[in-house]
Image (spheres, grey):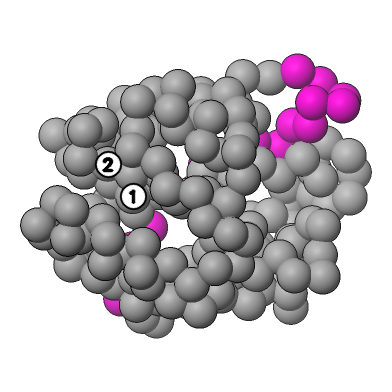
């Protein structure tokens, strides 16, 4: 069984200040504390998995191709810092347009990752900045940590690592 850190994307990993939808590579700004925290989590043996709602796709605000390019740049920045993301899962739907079970607060994407990577739920965590992140994670019994949008997660990282003595 593998322990994992699940993270929401916009507002947790990258800044969403001034943007309702963040999808342009030019708008990618990594939040303070993310690089160092992800490096620490990875060193402690956690898999890193991103779970994100990208409802702007369903609304026609941007495309899956835009999202994939954004994720490519994100992964490139992480690779430059020796960070490996196990997978980025995203829901392209929006509840105003179509119903689905992959959009948070539903938990299908988390469940998919948990099955694929054989996740140890008791020793894994979800870090999110919205109530829907926390609800989705609680549905599958993950430990949850709700942060303020764009908060530096260095203290959260220290808290998790101290709590589990990694």
Evaluate whether residue 116 shows in this view: no
Q: Is 87 one of the magenta-colored residues? A: yes
Residue 100's spot in the image, x, y percent? 68, 19
Of the 4 image quadrants, the one containing the C terminus is: bottom left
Q: Is disc 1 placed on a helix, strand or loop?
A: strand
Residue 144's spot in the image, x, y percent? 40, 41
Give the Cα separation between the discs numbered 2 and 1: 6 Å
Residue 127's spot in the image, x, y percent? 44, 50
Q: Is residue 135 left or right of residue 54?
A: left
Q: Is 68 one of the magenta-colored residues? A: no
Residue with the mark numbered 1: 5
Residue 97's spot in the image, x, y percent? 87, 25
Viewer-proximal residue among 158 and 71: 158
Viewer-proximal residue among 36 and 62: 36
Residue located at (65% from left, 69% from top): 15
Residues at circles 2 and 1 in contact by the CB criterion of under 8 Å: yes
In the image, residue 57 sits, relative to residue 69, either above or below, namely above
Viewer-proximal residue among 31 and 151: 151
In the image, residue 118 sits, relative to residue 59, either above or below, namely above
Residue located at (58% from left, 24% from top): 106
The quadrant holding residue 162 is bottom left
Stretch in magenta:
82-99
Q: Is residue 81 left or right of residue 1?
A: right
- On residue 124, the disc is 2
**Count of numbered labels shown in the rendering:** 2
């Amino acid at each position: 069984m593998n322990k994992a850190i699940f993270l929401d994307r916009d507002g947790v990993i990258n800044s969403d200040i001034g943007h309702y939808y963040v999808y342009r590579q030019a708008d990618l700004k990594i939040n303070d504390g993310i690089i160092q925290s992800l490096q620490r989590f990875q060193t402690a043996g956690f898999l890193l998995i991103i779970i994100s709602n990208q409802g702007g796709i369903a609304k026609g605000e941007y495309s899956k191709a835009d999202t994939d390019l954004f994720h490519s740049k994100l992964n490139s920045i992480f690779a430059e810092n020796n960070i490996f993301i196990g997978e980025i899962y995203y829901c392209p739907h929006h509840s105003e347009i179509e119903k689905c079970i992959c959009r948070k607060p539903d938990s299908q994407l988390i469940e998919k990752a948990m099955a694929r990577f054989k996740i140890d739920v008791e020793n894994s965590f979800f870090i999110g900045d919205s109530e829907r992140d926390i609800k989705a994670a609680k549905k599958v019994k993950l430990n949850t940590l709700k942060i303020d949008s764009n908060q530096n997660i260095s203290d959260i990282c220290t808290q998790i690592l101290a709590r589990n003595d990694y």
